[in-house]
Image (tube, rainbow, N blue to C red):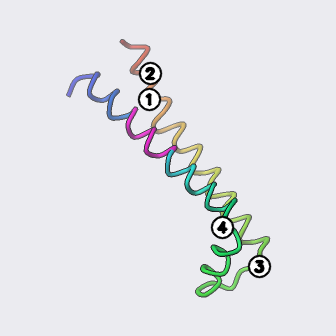
Amino acid sequence: MTTEIIRDVLAWCSLINVGFLLVWILGLIFAHDWLFRFHGQWFKLSVEKFDAIHYAGIAYYKISILFFNIVPYLAFRILG
């Protein structure tokens, strides 16, 4: 596998992951109450706990995208 292929794969992975992150964030913004009721069928959560779980999940996912996709992509771009 060449560095160009790896770089392209990392770029596409980054775009797909950022797209998923945006869907998650927009889903929480525009369908918060529905998502809370939907998850409330299985889990007994308060609104505060629900928000904290999703906030932590979004933060973890964003950091993971940065370290596992974007930073290696930039490293391969620097290598040429």
Lower sequence index among marks 4 and 1: 4
* Residue on which disc 3 sits: 46
User: Is 18 on the left or on the right of 6, as rendered?
Assistant: right
Q: Are marks 4 and 1 in contact (CB under 8 Å)?
A: no
SS under mark 4: loop
Q: Are marks 1 and 2 in contact (CB under 8 Å)?
A: yes
Structural crowding at the residue carrying mark 2, measured as other residues with C-alpha within 10 Å and reported as few (<14), some (14–19) or many (≥20): few
Lower sequence index among marks 3 and 1: 3
Structural crowding at the residue carrying mark 1, measured as other residues with C-alpha within 10 Å and reported as few (<14), some (14–19) or many (≥20): some
SS under mark 3: loop
Q: Residue at x 68, y 62 (%)?
A: 30
* Residue on which disc 2 sits: 75
Q: Report how far apart the C-alphas of labels 2 and 4 lie in the structure.
A: 37 Å
SS under mark 2: helix
Q: Residue at x 28, y 22 (%)?
A: 4
Q: Residue at x 61, y 79 (%)?
A: 39
Kindly identify the amino acid type of the residue bearing the numbered disc 4: Ala
Q: Report how far apart the C-alphas of labels 1 and 2 lie in the structure.
A: 5 Å
* Residue on which disc 4 sits: 31
Q: Report how far apart the C-alphas of labels 3 and 1 lie in the structure.
A: 38 Å
Q: Quadrant of residue 32?
A: bottom right
Q: Report how far apart the C-alphas of labels 4 and 3 lie in the structure.
A: 16 Å
Q: Residue at x 62, y 54 (%)?
A: 58
Residue 8 against residue 44 in the figure, above or below: above
* Residue on which disc 1 sits: 72
User: Is 67 on the left or on the right of 38, as rendered?
Assistant: left
Which quadrant of the rendered structure holds the C terminus? top left
Q: Is residue 61 magenta?
A: no
Q: Quadrant of residue 63?
A: top right
Question: Which residues make up the magenta segment?
Answer: 11-18
Mark in front: 2 vs 3: 3
Kindly identify the amino acid type of the residue bearing the numbered disc 3: Ser
